[in-house]
Amino acid sequence: MQERYQIDRRALIRGATLGGIGLGLSGLFPAWAQPVSAGIGPQMPTLSGEEVRLEVAHSAFTVGGRTGHAVTLNGTLPAPLIRLREGQNVRIHVANGLDEDTSIHWHGLLLPFQMDGVPGVSFPGIRPGETFTYEFPIRQSGTYWYHSHSGLQEQQGHYGPLILDPADGDPVGYDREHVIVLSDWSFLHPHEILRKLKQQAGYFNRQRITLAGRLSGDPEHRMSVEDREMWARMRMDPTDILDVTGATYTYLINGHSPEENWTGLFRPGERVRLRIINSGAMTIFNVRIPGLTMKVVAADGQNVRPVDVDELQISAAETYDVIVLPAKDRAYSFVAEAMDRSGLGRATLAPRPGMSAPVPPLRDRPILSMRDMGMDGMDHGPAQSRDHGGGLGSGHHGAAEAAQPMDHGDMDMRDQANAPQVRLGPGVDMIAPMPRDRTGEPGLGLENVGHRVLTYRDLAALTPPSDRRPPTRTVEVHLTGNMERFMWSFDGVALSEGAEPIRLARDERVRMRLINDSMMAHPIHIHGHFWSLVNGQGDHQPLKHTVNVLPGGTVDLDMTADAPGDWAFHCHLLLHMHAGMMRVVKVRPLDGDAA
C-alpha cells in the first residue's frame, strides 16, 4: 500500500503555533519528534545512507518549566531517527564530545560482536574527544532503537529510534506511520537515584498501604491480618512494583511531557502504523488508545500474525508495531501509564493540529500477591484487591484457586533451596518455591481490566523460524536479588563478583529457562541473537530479543548460538543491570579459530 503524506502545510504551521507548552523549544527536538508531526514519510529528514554521523555531547533539556542536564546525540533528546535498509552496509561515525567514555549499542541488531557497543565485553568504549566507526551489514528489518551502554547515560537522554526497511515488500500495509518513543526523565542524576535506592528500600514508592487506608474500607487496601504479618516478616511491601516512580519521573512521549502533548496527525480512514519503543530506563508501561483497537503486527522488530487488543504492557527495551484505524474526525489520546500507576505519558492522534481528547485518570495501583512470590495456588489476599475493572482480563485465575489457605507461620524464603546453582547470601532475599509459566498473563495489574490485553501467548511469528531443531540442552538462569538492599544478580552472583560466563557452542540449539525468584518483573535482553519464545505456537513461536519475566514466573526460550563472540545478557532495567544483573554469553569458536 502506498504511503500518503499530504497534510496541509499551512495547517501544520498553524497547529505548531497553537499546539501547547514547549513549542518554542521545538528546535531541540529531532524532526520526527517535533510537537506536531505529519508522520515519518519519505520527505522526513532522517539519518540514512551508507555514512551516518553522530556526536554525543552535554545539552540542556527543558520540560515542565525546569531545565536540567542531558546527554544527547546531535543535540536532541530523543536522538535523531536513523533509517536504513535491509541488505545495505553502513558506517556510523560516533564522536564523543563528553568528558567521559561513551558508547552506542544497536539494540536488537544482528551484527559482528565487535560492533555491538558494550564496553568491557565487545569493545573498549569511546574515549573523550575520540571517534569510533561502527561498520556492519543490515541483515534484518523492523523497529529497533539505539542507546548508550556506558554508565547511566541512557537515563540522561542517550537513546533514539532505528528503523530498518525490508529489502522486499513490507507485509504490513499502512498509509502513514509515526514513531512513538516512551521514556522516563528525572532532574535527579541517575547516580543520586541509585544512592537513594541503596539507602532506603522503596524510597520513591509514594503508594504504600497505610493504616488510614486500611481503616477506610477501600478495596485497594484490603488485606488480611495474616498477610500483613507475612509481608512484615519478609520486610517486603506489596506495593513495591517499580523501583523508580512518578515521584521523580516525568514520563515522556517523543521527548514531550503530558502537558506538552505531542501530536501525530492522520486522515480519517487511514491505516496508521505506530512504531512503539520503550526506551525507559526503569519503567514498564501499559499502553492504550481509548476508542481505538490496536492491531499488533510486530514484536521486537519481527512480524507476527496480527492480533487485536485494547491494551498492551510494553517492558523496558521492547518494541511493538501496531496498526490503528481512526475512522472518525476526532482526536484520540495515546496513554502510556506506568505499571505502578504513579504517572503516565500522554500524546494525541488527531486529524488536525491543536486538537485533544480526554485523558483517563490513573487507575488503582496493583498489589503484589502470593502468585508474585512464586507461591501459585496459595493466593487468598492481595490479588483479590486488584479486581477493580468489573471484568475478566486475559490472565484471570479463578476464585477457588485464589482462596486456598496457606500457613505462613514458619516461612523463611531463603530456606527454599530448590535451586542448588543459586549462590545464597545477602544478595538473595528469596527463592520462589513454586515458580510457574506466566506467559499467558497480561502483566501486573492488568488481570481484570475488562478488555482485551495482549499476552505473550497471543504472539505467533508470521513465518516459521529458519532453525526448528529441538534444543539439545537447557541452561537455567535464576533472576535473583535483595529488594531491601537493592542488590541484583543472576543465580545469586553479580557481574562484579566474577560471575562465570554462559558458554555456548557455535550453532548449538539450546533452551534458556529464566526463573524469576524475585518479586519484581525483569525485562531480560540478549545481545546479538533472537530467542524463540516457547509459548504454545509450535513452529510459529515468536522471535524476541527482550522478554519480560513476571515475578515468580518462568519463561522458556530456544535459541541458536549462530553468532560467535562475547555478548551481553542482562536485565534492561538500567539500575538492575548496573547493580549486577548481567552476564556474558560466550559463543565459540570464533571465525578463524579451529573447530
Image: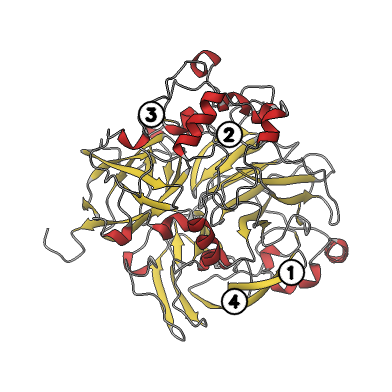
Quarter of the image for the C terminus: give it: bottom left
Q: What's the residue type where badge 3 is placed?
A: Met
Q: Which numbered dot is residue 74?
A: 4
Mark with earlier residue (3, 2) = 2
Residue located farthest toward the top when viewing the structure as drawn: 400
Q: What's the residue type where badge 1 is placed?
A: Arg
Residues 130 and 402: in front is 402
Q: Which secondary structure lies at badge 2?
A: loop
Instruction: Give the side of residue 90 with respect to residue 593, left or right.
Output: right
Separation of disc 4 and disc 3 at Cα?
54 Å
For mark 3, what is the residue?
A: 411
Query: Badge 4: few (under 14), some or many (20 or more) residues near its Cα, within 10 Å?
Result: some
Q: Which numbered dot is residue 66?
A: 1
Q: What's the residue type where badge 2 is placed?
A: Ile
Query: Badge 1: few (under 14), some or many (20 or more) residues near its Cα, within 10 Å?
Result: few
Instruction: Determine whether label 1 and label 2 are within 8 Å by CB.
Output: no
Q: Which numbered dot is residue 367?
A: 2
- Asked whether residue 214 appears in the rendered view, the answer is yes
